[in-house]
Image: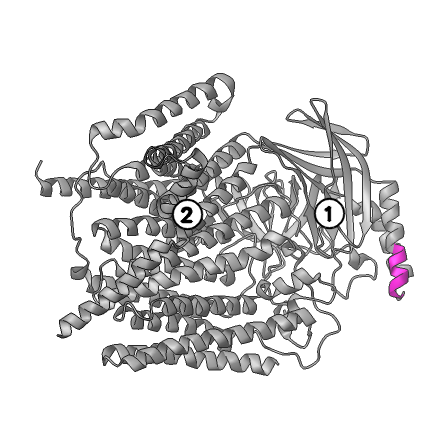
């Protein structure tokens, strides 16, 4: 094979590999992803990654199970959550949480260990927190 | 003093702008005195930043609460170690750390190259000046670390308890040193492009800085993982969180860069690729700094909405556009000096490893930004989780480890089949032996990916051992040295090469730990009362008694209250105790009762780990304090305005009540095989990198010679 054809072949192989990776990325990510949504948006029969704030005075522990309500970040509509598994350290009333699960009979039944609490970050401004 | 600090930053901003202006003017008009002046302005900048940094650090040490930053991130009862480090736990303070490190690194590189690279250095000075000016502008304009409060509060908010961990406090400076370090080769690459000096000079001048940056960034990532493992209470070391990914991406591309520049040094190939890689690394480093601050992505470390997101995005966009334009403009000057001779050669395999590393980075970039991408494309914000990342990165990681073994032992240009056979015979045999052993004696086949990784690790380690053996035995034949001496000399005389092998061995060992601990860990979540026991992976774990301690916790975090547990662990006749606990920090919320505020603040898991080379037993406890809710509420009602010492008595009584009559507590136990090898492998890699970057006497000699030969050349051309 002469050098120029060889180089062209290499280029084609390289581009094919890149295209393969790109397709894999697009395909797998769209099929594996879960939809992020607010408590006011969740509907039964579909799994969601719900984000919102824990409603004040709503946390109840019942043995291994944890019940609390999550409301929209900027609203009052809320949904009851039933959760089991590990509760992250920063979990508190009023904190933002992410939880995966499905709405069943009006209660958002969370997947085990899916609760993520955003930590009151090292870069959060106390000043802003108080004014809001 | 705050005024002096602010003034330092403002003057620093002008010094940085002057440095950029003077060096460009000097370079365009061939006025060397202007170039020198620009360089000295960078030294000035470093001094100014250091003064500002010292002022702020002193304020933190004195807990001067009139500084807004101190009141926000520290307090009088924060332990001294965490007072020192609280500086960079704040947004503004971390920007100052960035700028200070950048000015120090810039000064170092400009001092080292002051007599060489006369064409490139002024432009590099200008680039570094502009980057420094950007960070100073952020501080002067929006996030001044020297903001003061008209009325100093009685007490500061204190350092976020989650950050009270030694690894977490060294981790940010390490990361920043890494980020900043990569700006040095970036600046010189830009200089090389502008002046069309696209040979390997800029690479030789900044190669060591890239290595230093790589090492620090890698160490920072490792420390972050260690923090996650021992502090966050979930038991993992990597969660594919956007903030973690942000630090990993520049490291991956930086790794590609330090490999591919060797190809340019030795063979004059891959010039476009190299300048693109370093531009990408720098952009990713900026992106990492930005992601941590912007709050645009959902992350476990939500970094509160920031005022400087737009500025950062504009700057990053400018850097991307300018770098791309510059590379396109200089494309004719970036032609390779030679051709790739064979696909079985070191340069071809380096290129392959580069593609894998960049591929990994692209996967992570896509996954990290997927919420934004999907929102732009479909209108709904969707995200991908760790399983997606694991599925896509596993094959790439496997390929990477395999290449780690093959790449460095191939010769440049071309490898003959017989040479290939000679090099690979023993390692392939060892790999097959490892495969047979694993299949026969372990259950490694349960996870094919891990099994493949174990085999590849065996391959890499054999290759490295073979290289050391061959080198040392060659020395022995030539000099008659004993084995230890021959090995030491071998390492000392060829630091780049054998240091690099050590890094490869370390990375292989690290992946051994990752593969074993991710596929074969056993985890149990249980609720136990004292006396109960459970079994995990052959360990018989018994909850002996509850503990409740006030003040002075063992790890020095300054937590006022710690509830914990003592557990007896037995396995095969051996016996040891684990003492996990949970720290409670008081809340500053005035709406809470006098007593309940001690329990309603942050709480952090202080896990206890039985470290082992074969297996870690990791244990965290979550005491159930709901039984104390009633007495706490009563105390709130009855002792609303009691002085501090009475409050202490009440809390002591509550603690005793918990200790004597503990309700069932929740435990998480993890038995994780070989996880210690992640940290050991990381340490080996860092050690190898130190060996590789340590200057040799010969290198200094070479540098001096280069300076003189450059001068001679100039004299001759003038004559």
Residue B87: x, y in percent? 60, 66
Asked whether the residues under the numbered discs 1 and 2 touch, taking CB atoms below 8 Å apart as contact, a structural biologist would say no
Question: In front: mark 1 or mark 2?
Answer: 1
Camera-nearest residue between B424 and B486: B486
- Identity of the residue furthest to the front in this view: B480
Camera-nearest residue between B555 and A5: B555
Asked if the magenta segment contains residue A10, the reply would be no
Residue range of the region highlighted in magenta in the rendering: B643-650
Q: Which residue is mark 2?
A: B364
- Identity of the residue furthest to the top in this view: B440
Camera-nearest residue between B595 and B63: B63
**Is any part of residue B147 visible from this angle?**
yes
Which residue: 58% across, 33% down? B613
For the C terminus of chain B, give its image quadrant: bottom left
Image: A123 above or below B6? above
Residue B582 shows which numbered tag? 1
Residue B191: x, y in percent? 28, 67
- Identity of the residue furthest to the left in this view: A2
Which residue: 14% across, 43% down? A8
**Is any part of residue B279 visible from this angle?**
no
* Secondary structure category for the residue under label 2: helix
């Amino acid at each position: 094979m002469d050098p120029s054809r060889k180089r062209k072949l290499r280029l084609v192989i390289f581009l094919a590999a890149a295209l393969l990776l790109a397709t894999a990325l697009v395909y797998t990510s769209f099929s594996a992803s879960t939809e992020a949504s607010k408590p006011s948006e969740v509907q039964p029969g579909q799994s969601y990654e719900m984000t919102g704030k824990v409603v004040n005075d709503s946390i109840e522990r019942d043995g291994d199970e944890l019940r609390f309500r999550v409301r929209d970040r900027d609203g009052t509509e809320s949904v009851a959550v039933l959760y089991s598994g590990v509760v992250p350290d920063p979990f508190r009333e009023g904190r933002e949480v992410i939880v995966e699960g499905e709405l069943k009979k009006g209660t958002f039944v969370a997947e085990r260990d899916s609760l993520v609490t955003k930590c009151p970050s090292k870069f959060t401004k106390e000043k802003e927190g108080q004014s809001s | 003093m705050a005024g002096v600090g602010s003034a330092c930053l403002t003057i620093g901003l002008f010094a940085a702008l002057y440095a950029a202006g003077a060096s460009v003017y000097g370079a365009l008009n061939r006025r060397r005195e202007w170039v020198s002046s620009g360089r000295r302005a960078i030294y000035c900048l470093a001094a100014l930043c250091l003064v500002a940094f010292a002022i702020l650090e002193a304020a933190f040490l004195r807990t001067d609460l009139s500084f807004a930053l101190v009141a926000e991130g520290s307090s009088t009862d924060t332990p001294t170690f965490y007072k020192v480090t609280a500086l960079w736990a704040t947004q503004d303070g971390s920007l100052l750390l960035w700028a200070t490190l950048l000015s120090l690194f810039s000064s170092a590189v400009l001092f080292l190259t002051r007599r060489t690279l006369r064409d490139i250095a002024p432009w590099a000075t200008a680039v570094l000046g502009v980057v420094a000016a950007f960070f100073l502008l952020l501080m002067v304009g929006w996030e001044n670390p020297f903001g003061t409060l008209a009325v100093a509060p009685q007490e500061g908010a204190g350092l976020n308890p989650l950050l009270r961990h030694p690894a977490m406090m060294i981790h940010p400076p390490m990361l920043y040193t890494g980020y900043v370090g990569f700006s040095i080769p970036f600046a010189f690459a830009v200089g090389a492009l502008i002046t069309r000096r696209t040979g390997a000079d800029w690479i030789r001048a900044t190669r060591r800085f890239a290595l230093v940056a790589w090492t620090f960034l890698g160490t920072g990532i490792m420390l972050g993982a260690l923090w996650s493992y021992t502090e966050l209470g979930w038991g993992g070391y990597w969660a594919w969180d956007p903030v973690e990914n942000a630090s990993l991406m520049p490291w991956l591309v930086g790794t590609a860069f330090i490999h591919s520049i060797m190809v340019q040094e030795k063979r004059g190939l891959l010039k476009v690729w190299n300048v693109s890689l370093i531009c990408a690394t720098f952009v990713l480093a900026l992106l990492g700094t930005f992601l941590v601050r912007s709050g645009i992505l959902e992350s476990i470390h939500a970094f509160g909405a920031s005022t400087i997101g737009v500025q950062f995005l504009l700057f990053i966009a400018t850097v991307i556009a300018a770098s791309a334009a510059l590379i396109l403009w200089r494309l004719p000057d970036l032609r390779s000096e030679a051709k790739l001779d064979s696909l079985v050669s070191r340069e071809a395999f380096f290129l392959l490893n580069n593609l894998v590393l960049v591929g990994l980075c692209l996967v992570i970039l896509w996954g990290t930004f997927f919420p934004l991408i999907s929102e732009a494309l479909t209108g709904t914000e969707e995200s991908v989780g760790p399983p997606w990342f694991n599925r896509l990165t596993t094959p790439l990681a496997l390929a990477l480890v395999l290449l780690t073994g093959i790449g460095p032992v191939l010769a440049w240009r071309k490898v003959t089949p017989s040479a290939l056979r000679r090099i690979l015979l023993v390692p392939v045999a060892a790999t097959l032996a490892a495969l047979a052993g694993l299949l026969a004696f372990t259950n490694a086949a349960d996870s094919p990916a891990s099994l493949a990784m174990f085999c590849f690790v065996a391959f890499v380690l054999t290759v490295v051992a073979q290289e050391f053996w061959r080198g040392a035995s060659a020395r022995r034949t030539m000099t008659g040295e004993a084995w230890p001496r021959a090995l030491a000399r071998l390492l000392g005389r060829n630091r780049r090469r054998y240091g690099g092998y050590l890094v490869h061995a370390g990375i292989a060992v690290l992946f051994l730990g990752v593969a074993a601990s991710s596929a074969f860990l056993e985890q149990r979540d249980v609720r136990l009362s004292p006396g109960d026991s459970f079994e995990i992976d052959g360990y018989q774990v018994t909850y002996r008694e509850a503990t409740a301690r006030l003040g002075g916790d063992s790890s020095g975090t300054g937590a006022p209250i710690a509830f914990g547990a003592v557990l007896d662990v037995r396995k095969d006749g051996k016996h040891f105790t684990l003492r996990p606990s949970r720290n409670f920090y008081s809340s500053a919320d005035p709406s809470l009762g006098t007593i309940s505020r001690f329990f309603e603040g942050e709480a952090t898991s202080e896990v206890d780990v039985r470290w082992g080379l074969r297996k870690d037993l990791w244990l965290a406890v979550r005491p159930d304090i709901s039984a104390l809710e009633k007495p706490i509420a009563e105390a709130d009602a009855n002792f609303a305005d009691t002085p501090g010492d009475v409050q202490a008595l009440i809390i002591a009584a509550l603690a005793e009540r918990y200790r004597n009559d503990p309700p069932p507590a929740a435990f998480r136990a993890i038995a994780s095989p070989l996880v210690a090898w992640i940290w050991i492998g990381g340490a080996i890699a860092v050690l190898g990198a130190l060996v590789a970057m340590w200057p040799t006497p010969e290198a200094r000699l070479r540098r001096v010679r280069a300076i003189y030969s450059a001068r001679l050349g100039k004299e001759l051309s003038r004559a």
